[in-house]
Each structure stands twice: as C-alpha cells, then as structure tokens.
Image: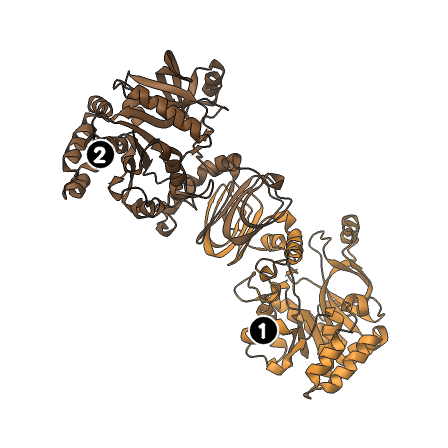
Chain colours: A brown, B orange
Amino acid sequence: MHIAIMAGGTGTRFWPRSRRKLPKHLLNIVGRASMLEQTVRRIAPLAPPENIVIVTTRGQKDAIRRELPWIPPTNILVEPVGRNTAASIGLAATFVARRDREEVMASLPADHVVSRASALRAVLRAAARQAAKGQELVTIGIRPTRPESGYGYIKLGRSLEKAGSQTLYWADRFVEKPSEALVKRFLSSGKYVWNSGMFICRVDTMLRMIHEHLPRLARGLERIGRAMGSPELRRILSEEYAALPSISIDYGVAEREKQVVVIPADLGWCDVGSWQALLELSSRAGNGNVILGKHVGIDSAGCLIHSPRRLVATIGIQGLVIVDTDDALLVCRADRSQDVRRVVEELEKRGLTKYL
Amino acid sequence: MHIAIMAGGTGTRFWPRSRRKLPKHLLNIVGRASMLEQTVRRIAPLAPPENIVIVTTRGQKDAIRRELPWIPPTNILVEPVGRNTAASIGLAATFVARRDREEVMASLPADHVVSRASALRAVLRAAARQAAKGQELVTIGIRPTRPESGYGYIKLGRSLEKAGSQTLYWADRFVEKPSEALVKRFLSSGKYVWNSGMFICRVDTMLRMIHEHLPRLARGLERIGRAMGSPELRRILSEEYAALPSISIDYGVAEREKQVVVIPADLGWCDVGSWQALLELSSRAGNGNVILGKHVGIDSAGCLIHSPRRLVATIGIQGLVIVDTDDALLVCRADRSQDVRRVVEELEKRGLTKYL
C-alpha cells in the first residue's frame, strides 16, 4: 500500500512555537521528534519509503527533506497554495495512480498523536483489505473517551462483515463540531465515533469519487497528472492550483458519498488542537505542571511552561500556558488557548509579519 | 549643603530586572532615567556637583560613573561590603567632615520616587536651616495617603517653631512595619507620618551621635577618615568595614537619639518596593495594563508587562506581572510580588548564580 501524509497545515494554534514556516507537524511538542516524523515512523512498517508520499507547501519542503532524508525527494509533493484536504489527497492519489491505478492509499494527517501504534497499523491493514475491493472509501473512527465538541463525529450505520478483530460499519452521517448537548447524546447513544481524518481508498476509486462530487477538482488533477514527470509540472501546478475548490475531503467527498465504510478503533488518538490539549495530554510533574526548560515555581500549579532557553520563575499562578521563544512570548489562560488564533490574526492586522 | 545619596542597595525585589550588579536604583523602571539619576537630578539645584556624594558598592561603581559622569569620581565612595545605612551615612559624613566639620549633609535613598521635586527641595532647605543650628538630626516625614503596613512610621511629638510654610515636630517614636490594625489607628490619629529615610544633619553632629550610640562604628569611621586621601584608604576600608555593625540609621541612631526633628511633607513619595507597587504607581493604559514593549492582549487587564525585546501576547489574564529579560522571565500574580525574593533565594540555593 501507499501512505500519503498530509503535511500542508499552517496551524496557528501553537503560536508562538508554530509559525508559517514551522507549523505544528514540524514541532516536537509531543515527544522528541516532530509530529510528522513520529507519524511517518509509526506507519513505516506498512510501506517501504518509496511508497510514502508527503504533501506539503513550498515553505516547508526543505525542512521536511531534512527531517525525513530517507523519503525519496520526488515523493514530497509541493502544493503552490493550500487548497484543503480534498485537493491534497487528490494530488497524492494522482501521483500514486501513475504507478498503479489499483493501489490502495491511506491518507493520514501529519499532526495527530496516536499512542497505540500497533493498533493503528492493524486497523490500517484491515481498512486496506476492505479498500482493495475497490468500491468504498474507508475511514477510521475513534471511539470517544470524553465529550469533545471540538471534534467531528461520524454516526455508525449498519455493520458489514467482521474482518478479524475489527468490525466495519457503513458511515451514516458526518457531523462537524456539534453542540455540547448533541455531543452528550452522541456519547450515550454509543453510535458515534470521532472523525480521525484518516481515509483509505484505492486511488482509482478516490479519483472516481472526486470526479463525481468535485468535478472542477478532478479536471485540475487530470491536467496536473498529465504533467507529472515532465518539466512542465511546476508551471501547471501553479496555473491550476489556485483555481481548485478549497474543501475538505470530509465535506467534499465523504459526506456526499454513499459508499463510505468506517472502522472504529481505540488508538490513544488525539488531534492536539491547542496548548490546553497538549497540557491535558502530557504527563504532569509535581503540582500538575508540564515543564520544558528551567523553572522556579512558587505556588504554581496546572501550568504548561515551554521555555527551552530562558529560565522561567512563576509565583502564585494556576492553569496558565507560558510559551517562550526567541522573539515572542505567550502567557495565556489554558482554557482560553483556542484564542491563540486571535493573537495571530491581530499580528496579521498590525503587519507584525515577522512574528507569524 | 552636601547631599549624600545611598546607592548601595542590592535589592532583589525587582528580579529579574534587578540583579546583583544592577540593583533597583540603576533601573529605569520609573521614567526614562535610572532612579538614581532621577534622585540626583531632583536635588541638583540644592548643591553643586562637587557637593554631591554617592555611597555604593564596588560592583556598581563603574555603572554609576557612566550614569553620572558630571559627579567628581572622588565623590563616589565605595563600601567593600554592605553594612546598612548607619555605616553608609557615617562614611559620607566622615568624607564631608574632612572638608568642613560644620557642613550640613542630607542623606537620601537612591531608589525612591518623589513626584513633587520642588516640594522636596523646599523641605530639604527648611531641614538644612534647622540642622545648621547643630543640635538635631532632622528627618522628613511623609503624610500617609493610604494604610501601608510595609512602611516605617514616625510619631509626631510637640511642634517646634514654624519655619516658613513648614511645621517642625519633635520625633516621638519610630515604628517599623506595624500591623494593619495599628496602621489604621496611626492614620486616624493624624499623628503619624511615613519614615522617608531622608536624614539631614550637620556632619559633626551626625558623627557625635554615631559616637554616642554606635561607638564601634565611630571607631572604624575615625580610622577610615584618617586614611582618606592617602593610598592606604582601600586597604583600611577593607580591614575595617567587615567588622562594622550592620544597622540602619533609623534603629542605630534616630530611635536612640532624643534630638530628632521631623518635618511632615507631601512629596508624591513612594518607595516602590515591589512590582505591584510599580504597577499601582504607573499610569495605566487601556484595561489598566502597564506595558513596556510590544504587546498583543486579548481580554487581559490589570497587568504589568515589561518586555523591551520580545513581543508578548496575553490571553484571558488579570492582575499578573510579566517581566521578560534576556535570560530570565517572571510571571507572577501582582499581589504576590513580594515573593520575588523567594525566587532569588531559590536560585541561590540551586546555585543558579548567573541569574542573580
């Protein structure tokens, strides 16, 4: 199988550590390696390096080549502009289809935490077996462990046959970021799983689905596909990409498609969408603090402190996120960390682009 | 008259901006110039540069010479070790007495805020006139504007004659850092003033009082005085100083002396003893924040943010002190800022001397 890693995000939620040229998946905020490297290492037993494809942006390409020198450079696909996941996955499918139209490709986000790597590989293998039949788009659902209104949900429909220890279901419906009341009903019904953003499909099937639901995208990808391997590619990509529809694979294909299969799994999965999520995910030191760097704390608890260079002293504070970098410092109430994007917007508005 | 500025403090209360070699009076935390420079400029109309004496430590001498190049270098007296204000004032008095034993000398702390400079000069002139009579130690009392248990208080006794617009009183009693209950009684009685730490006295009178109340200090100062102007001075200072009693002029002389006169005054005075005091003293920007540096704030109020180099972004925080320096960062609840000294103690304990 081929595995395509979607590494084009320009996430702002981990500012000031994440920047335009250093998005979340290139940070080592969880563990020692970057989230991208961890993602790739996790699935490496499933596919040889030449079958691993990375989709990213021009600004990140060099960093990714340095990070993953064992991935063939031609497998790093550069999007001239970001056009959301339907375009990224379509581009990867087009690239793989030139090798083998019937190849199964798993598309995975580069910036999620999966603590149970072998469970992930098992469910991807089961998904690939189902996808190889050539009819369905297969996705991985995460069994919810808490009410979480920031995630997308998938309602499980009828079950298909069991495949080994995995049970497969038809996907009944996708719900993006539901209300808290709805989330509680979802959890008690037992019929909903979190949308992990992992999609497994034969590339010909994926391109057929894109052709059916997003014909404008399909036309662009066909022209790009014809230019692949030629010196024209870069020019054609530039011409086509900006005009492609910017839509997620979830909205653009999965929700519109009848033939979607979902496999629920327990993967120790987390999309680590904010500093608060990272704080909750991390193992705590004394007083429930998560500390990276030198720290002197007096009556300080429940804080996340990232300061690789400077000593940080804190007195009498609770539940704060403190992130120090060479040129910018964030001090934020942990439960307000989704508002970090408002800081980034403000920096854009004021023209303080050197901090972006 | 001569004016001696006590600039030997190694205050830790403004860490991380204040350091061993950069104590509070060398910081420009209030206004553009250092507190020392502001102190000297405030009293400059009262005395020519050759009559201004600075008492400091070896580590600060060069910084002070750079800061105040117009003060004759020989007027900068260096204490080999800190021995509190009785020794510092005694050293300055000894120095001045070699010029003129009957000269009046005003001793002033280097690190207080006085917003009404002309009122200060008027009261110092009145104090000098009284001191010139050669009998009393004169001190300036600040009329209290709020209950403040961190200050020292002086109880006003019988009044002496009026001198112009100033009324002079005998000092009845000194009370260091009274309880909050006591402070309330002091304020409602109308008979107490804050101890400003400013003492005005003829130098022969001051040395006589030291001789009477602190004979060990007087003996040391006499030997030092004999060495002044000779190449022996530095050696003699080193030999004598460590053995001098370490006691404040308040405890060691003023409280024991009967002949102490106090002149109450309204000077817009503040000793700026903590980051919180600085926050309260400063004019507030929107949301009651006091900002030095680039700041992006979302729902942030009542904070003091000092960050001359790095951009600081804050989200959802109230009443915090954030002080960023090249190698250390402080995040502290404003009403806990007296605990900054505990951070300094902890740094000492851990041997992290580079941050001191």
Tell me if residue B86 can be seen.
Answer: yes
Q: Is residue A136 left or right of residue A98?
A: right
Judge by depth and name the residue closer to the eye, A155 or B287.
A155
Residue B144, given in percent of the width and then of the height, sits at: 71, 56
Tell me if residue A176 can be seen.
Answer: no
Amino acid type for the residue under numbered disc 2: Phe
Label placed on residue A295: none
Label placed on residue B64: 1
Locate residue B213: give its quadrant.
bottom right
Chain to which mark 2 belongs: A
SS at mark 1? Answer: helix
Is residue A231 positioned above or below B217 on the image?
A: above
Name the residue carrying label 2: A95
Is residue B179 positioned above or below B245 on the image?
A: above
Locate residue A28: give its quadrant.
top left
Residue A295, given in percent of the width and then of the height, sits at: 58, 50
Residue A245, given in percent of the width and then of the height, sits at: 23, 31
Q: Is residue B41 left or right of residue A143?
A: right
Judge by depth and name the residue closer to the eye, B236 or A191.
A191
Amino acid type for the residue under numbered disc 1: Ile
Judge by depth and name the residue closer to the eye, A63 or B281.
A63
